[in-house]
Image (cartoon, helix red, strand yellow):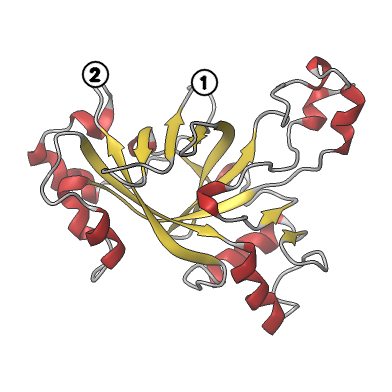
């Protein structure tokens, strides 16, 4: 049995409390991948009482990818492989699980390895609206009420950066395909996309600002950590320079 054929399988977690739109194909080719160190670290959705925790790591620096450990309010953790995708001037995350629902990473480790053949390859996508140091959060899109509501009243000693993302939601997506069934190739029941990577890229770029695809924003704050690398240790005087620096491309 070739384990590499089984690395992608049914997305079993619900991110952020909504059922995401799923895709048989990834949003990226190798040429579309970028890496941003500002994404690394532990992010929470509420600095007063976090409901979810998003931890981005880079276990293998030779790979242009992240490990995302997602924890819900009950403390349950789910692990995903995540790629940062740059399409024109927009950033997206392509997320898929790195292990089977029963916890094994390799098919041969399952009690019934044959069962691995019944999991199908799926990805889900997340749009990044903004990633900034906390001191520069006002440089995120203007009149952004979600950002204002999520930020601490003053610059926090516990957090250093803000990340604004938009998730997909199958109910919202049903409205889009209900109005135009040919907008993107999908299964008849809706929220499983069958379009090719190229078609997906054209689709998400066209509808990147449409809330029927990417729903209302979720704002995350990154916890400061001692000895952390990158922006977490950055001097406030460097904020302006960091804000104007391009996303690093490490292909």
Residue 102: in sight, yes or no?
yes
Q: Nearer the viewer, residue 13 or 63?
A: 13
Q: Picture coordinates of residue 162 (x, y %)?
A: 28, 47
Q: Earlier in the sequence, mark 1 or mark 2?
A: 1
Q: Nearer the viewer, residue 238 or 51?
A: 51
Q: Picture coordinates of residue 146 (x, y %)?
A: 30, 62
Q: Nearer the viewer, residue 92 or 192?
A: 192
Which quadrant of the figure contains the N terminus?
Answer: top right
Decide if residue 222 is on the left or right side of residue 95. Answer: left
User: Label 1's element?
Assistant: loop
Against 51, residue 142 (above or below) is below
Q: Which residue is mark 2?
A: 227
Q: Which residue is pictured at 49% across the width and 31% down the height? A: 75
Q: Nearer the viewer, mark 1 or mark 2?
A: 2
Q: Which residue is mark 1?
A: 60
Decide if residue 227 is on the left or right side of residue 124. Answer: left
Q: Nearer the viewer, residue 45 or 51?
A: 51
Q: Which residue is pictured at 69% across the width and 43% down the height? A: 11
Instruction: Residue 111: name its quadrant.
Output: top right
Q: Picture coordinates of residue 236 (x, y %)?
A: 10, 39
Q: Picture coordinates of residue 133 (x, y %)?
A: 22, 44
Decide if residue 131 is on the left or right side of residue 143. Answer: right
Decide if residue 60 is on the left or right side of residue 185. Answer: left
Q: Which mark is residue 158?
A: none
Q: Which residue is pictured at 74% across the width and 42% down the height? A: 10
Q: Which residue is pictured at 24% across the width and 71% down the height? A: 143
């Amino acid at each position: 049995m070739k384990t590499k054929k089984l690395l992608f399988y049914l997305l079993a977690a619900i991110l952020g409390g909504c059922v995401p739109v799923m895709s048989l194909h990834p949003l990226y080719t190798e040429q579309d991948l970028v890496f941003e160190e500002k994404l690394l670290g532990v992010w929470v959705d509420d600095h007063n009482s976090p409901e979810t925790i998003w931890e981005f790591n880079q276990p293998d620096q030779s790979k242009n990818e992240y490990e995302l450990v997602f924890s819900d309010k009950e403390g349950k953790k789910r692990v995903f492989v995540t790629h940062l995708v740059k399409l024109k001037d927009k950033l997206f995350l392509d997320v898929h699980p790195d292990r089977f629902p029963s916890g094994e990473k390799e098919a041969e480790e399952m009690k019934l390895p044959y069962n691995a053949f019944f999991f199908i390859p799926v990805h889900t996508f997340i749009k990044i609206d903004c990633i900034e140091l906390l001191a520069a959060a006002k440089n995120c899109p203007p009149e952004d009420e979600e950002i204002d509501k999520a930020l601490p009243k003053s610059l926090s000693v516990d957090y250093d950066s803000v990340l604004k993302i938009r998730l997909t939601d199958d109910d919202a997506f049903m409205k889009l395909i209900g109005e135009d069934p040919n907008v993107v190739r999908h299964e008849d029941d809706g929220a499983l996309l069958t379009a090719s990577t190229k078609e997906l890229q054209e689709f998400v770029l066209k509808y990147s600002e449409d809330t029927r695809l990417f729903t209302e924003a979720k704002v995350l704050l990154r916890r400061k950590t001692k000895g952390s690398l990158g922006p977490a240790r950055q001097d406030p005087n460097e904020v302006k320079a960091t804000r104007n620096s391009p996303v690093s491309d490490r292909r």
